[in-house]
Amino acid sequence: MTIEPSDGSGAWIRRAVPSDAAALVRLRALMLEAMGLPVGAADAPWRSAALDWFDERLARTDEFAAFVAEDPGLGVVSSAVGICDRHAPGPLNLSGVHGHVFNVSTDPRRRGLGHARACLDALLDWFATGTGARVISLNATGDGLGLYRSLGFTAPRHPALRLRLTQEEPEG
């Protein structure tokens, strides 16, 4: 799949492979930083853990996919990532497979050119044709809300809640 951005850079969309793990971590850091989270330096421990995590997941092509926009001059500049979870079947989802979209991020030097939309379109196509997922969720930032709504995402009927558990230091 090729997209022709307005700047003529000729970026193209492809499914990510394990060698793209570092680029996915870099884009994740840009996204988290834009959300106001402290991401630390290039050697922050979370980055190494995320690199290992992406590397492992990219090999699980039946339950995990990432699509990236690759720019001829800058390399990977955008991503959309998805994972499948297995839930108990229900009347509207007999397979029980749910999809979750995350890590939708674009390098600031290439924003506004349609890269995130193209990556997300490819990811949603993978969910529709390559998995049993019929329910796809995501957490939206203000910057992404318009894109997600234009693709048909709506607020769930029942609100999502979250509890953060803190880990206690082991004694001894």
Image (tube, rainbow, N blue to C red):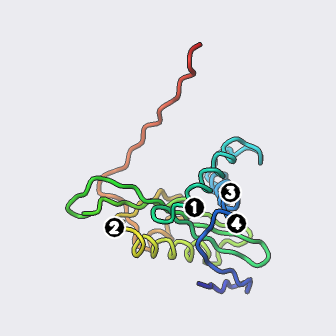
Q: CA distance from mark 1 to mark 3?
A: 20 Å
Few, some or many residues within 10 Å of mark 3 (<14, 14–19, 20+)? some
Q: Secondary structure at mark 1?
A: loop
Kindly check if marks 4 and 3 are in contact, taking CB atoms under 8 A apart as contact.
yes
Q: Secondary structure at mark 3?
A: helix
140 or 50, nearer to the observer: 50
Amino acid of disc 3: Leu
Q: CA distance from mark 2 to mark 1?
A: 21 Å
In the rendered structure, find residue 134 and report the number of the disc placed on it.
Answer: 2
Q: Is residue 81 left or right of residue 138?
A: right
Q: CA distance from mark 2 to mark 3?
A: 30 Å
Of labels 2 and 4, earlier in sequence is: 4
118 or 82, nearer to the observer: 82
137 or 61, nearer to the observer: 61
- Residue at position x 42%, y 59% in the image: 84
Camera-nearest label, 2 or 1: 1
Q: Which residue is mark 3?
A: 30
- Residue at position x 74%, y 83% in the image: 9
Question: Which x, y percent locates residue 67?
Answer: 58, 70
Residue 78 higher or lower than 46, as above or below = below
In the rendered structure, find residue 107 and report the number of the disc placed on it.
Answer: 4
In the rendered structure, find residue 58 and report the number of the disc placed on it.
Answer: 1
Q: CA distance from mark 4 to mark 1?
A: 21 Å
Few, some or many residues within 10 Å of mark 2 (<14, 14–19, 20+)? some
Q: Is residue 168 left or right of residue 51?
A: left
Kindly check if marks 2 and 3 are in contact, taking CB atoms under 8 A apart as contact.
no
Of labels 4 and 1, earlier in sequence is: 1
Q: Secondary structure at mark 4?
A: loop
Q: CA distance from mark 2 to mark 4?
A: 30 Å
Amino acid of disc 1: Leu
Q: CA distance from mark 4 to mark 3?
A: 7 Å
